[in-house]
Image: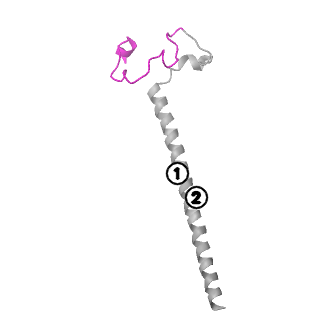
Amino acid sequence: RARAAAGFPGPSAARRPSASSAGLASSPGDVTAQEGSGPEMESSPPPDPEVAAQAHYKAIAEAEFERWRMTKAAEEEARKVLDEFRKQRALAEKRKLKK
């Protein structure tokens, strides 16, 4: 961390976007409208892009899993309805043949 604070790139610097390309303040003195104000904002460090990316992809994965789960539940329900329909149709055919 000392090297990063001194301006030396770390091992993951190649895959991280630079502060200027990410739309972040270029120097510690710059203040943007997005940062807000107040003592709690002054003491907190800027968010780590890797942590933000992990949270983003985790949210996407959770949404995809929920969509898959709902789709699977809908397929199971449709299968039950179809099975019930087939059973009723078979019973109707049997009644028709008896007459």
Above or below: residue 70 compared with residue 76? above
Alpha-carbon span between mark 1 and mark 2: 10 Å
Coordinates of residue 60 in the picture (x, y in percent) = 51, 40
Q: Nearer the viewer, residue 86 or 96?
A: 96
Coordinates of residue 74 in the picture (x, y in percent) = 58, 58
The quadrant the N terminus occupies is: top left
Q: Residue furthest bottom?
A: 99
- Relative placement, left or right, of 15 versus 98 is left
Q: Residue furthest left?
A: 11
Part of the protein shown in magenta = 1-29
- For the point 59% across and 63% down, which residue is it? 78
Question: Which callout, 1 or 2, points at the residue further toward the start of the chain?
Answer: 1
Circle 1 residue:
68
Magenta stretch containing residue 18, yes or no?
Answer: yes
Question: Given the image, on which type of amino acid does mark 1 rest?
Answer: Trp
Q: Nearer the viewer, residue 48 or 95?
A: 95
Coordinates of residue 93 in the picture (x, y in percent) = 62, 83
The quadrant the C terminus occupies is: bottom right
The secondary structure that most of the magenta stretch takes on is loop
- For the point 56% across and 16% down, which residue is it? 42
- Relative placement, left or right, of 26 versus 12 is right
Instruction: Give the number of the disc on residue 74.
Output: 2
Say which element carries label 1: helix
- For the point 50% across and 11% down, which residue is it? 26
Coordinates of residue 96 in the picture (x, y in percent) = 65, 86
Label 1 crowding class (10 Å Cα cut-off): few <14, some 14-19, many 20+? Answer: few
Above or below: residue 3 compared with residue 48? above
Q: Nearer the viewer, residue 58 or 89?
A: 89
